[in-house]
Amino acid sequence: DSGVTQTPKHLITATGQRVTLRCSPRSGDLSVYWYQQSLDQGLQFLIQYYNGEERAKGNILERFSAQQFPDLHSELNLSSLELGDSALYFCASSVGPAGSTDTQYFGPGTRLTVL
Amino acid sequence: QQPVQSPQAVILREGEDAVINCSSSKALYSVHWYRQKHGEAPVFLMILLKGGEQKGHEKISASFNEKKQQSSLYLTASQLSYSGTYFCGTEGGSQGNLIFGKGTKLSVKP
């Protein structure tokens, strides 16, 4: 158990819908990272927040947005869902702001299925 | 730019050794190694920072050659529990995010 929690575990929805994925980092961690993992794309970095501020942005679509709240939990919002958005979405957390030097601890993931 | 991992897959017998390589086309600041078992989250193995430092974790160690922009993960006397997909994550600067390779699937058979 990494200490990172994600809800829900599974989510099934229809194309065009909007969903929200939630992540609570490990106690004491200030950074939250979101990743998308699909069979053909591997583990893709989406976005990082550090202490409430956006820190780094990766291959995140405009239909996707995220935020980190004062209590440090984070939410990833996915809208106008398409079939291709079906994937495992992982959240990871680390102590500091630098994803390149900090250990990132991954949550169990949310499996999103878009029908 | 996404690092390239090789081999894509490897099958071992228990007790055999394996090497997984991770190469980048750009200068690297750090390399992270993770193992992911089917249906589970990636689990951190180790970080290597530029300086050529070799690190170890039980019977798993890694090296980082910053001149060649390469890292290698060494698994010795493999155990069944080593099975999974190994990912390297690389970063070319000190403040950026990780880019992960496509993974190397390792299967250890009894």
Image: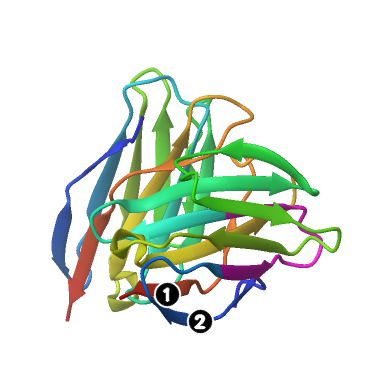
Crowding at mark 2 (Cα within 10 Å: few <14, some 14-19, many 20+): some
Chain ID at mark 1: A
Return the residue at label 2: A9
Chain ID at mark 2: A
User: Which amino acid type is marked by label 2?
Assistant: Lys
Using residue B24 as the reference point, say whether residue B96 is left or right of it: right
Using residue A49 as the reference point, say whether residue B80 is left or right of it: left
Q: In which quarter of the image is the N terminus of chain A?
A: bottom right
Please identify the quarter of the rendering in which residue B18 is found: bottom left
Establish if B35 lies above or below B47.
below
Residue B83 is situated, as x and y percent measured from the top left of the image, at: 28, 71
Residue A41 is situated, as x and y percent measured from the top left of the image, at: 29, 51
The question of residue A26 being in magenta is answered with yes
The question of residue B36 being in magenta is answered with no
From the viewer's side, name the closer residue of B44 and A30: A30
Span of residues in magenta:
A20-33
Residue at image coords 33%, 44%: B101
Whether residue A5 appears in this view of the structure is: yes
- The reply to whether callout 2 and callout 1 are in contact (CB within 8 Å) is yes
From the viewer's side, name the closer residue of B13 and B94: B94
Total tally of numbered discs in the picture: 2
Using residue B91 as the reference point, say whether residue A102 is left or right of it: right
Crowding at mark 1 (Cα within 10 Å: few <14, some 14-19, many 20+): many
In terms of sequence position, does the residue under pointer 2 or pointer 1 come before the other?
2
Return the residue at label 1: A111
Residue B19 is situated, as x and y percent measured from the top left of the image, at: 25, 48
* Helix, strand or loop at mark 1: strand
User: Which amino acid type is marked by label 1?
Assistant: Arg
Establish if A61 lies above or below B37.
above
Residue B108 is situated, as x and y percent measured from the top left of the image, at: 20, 72
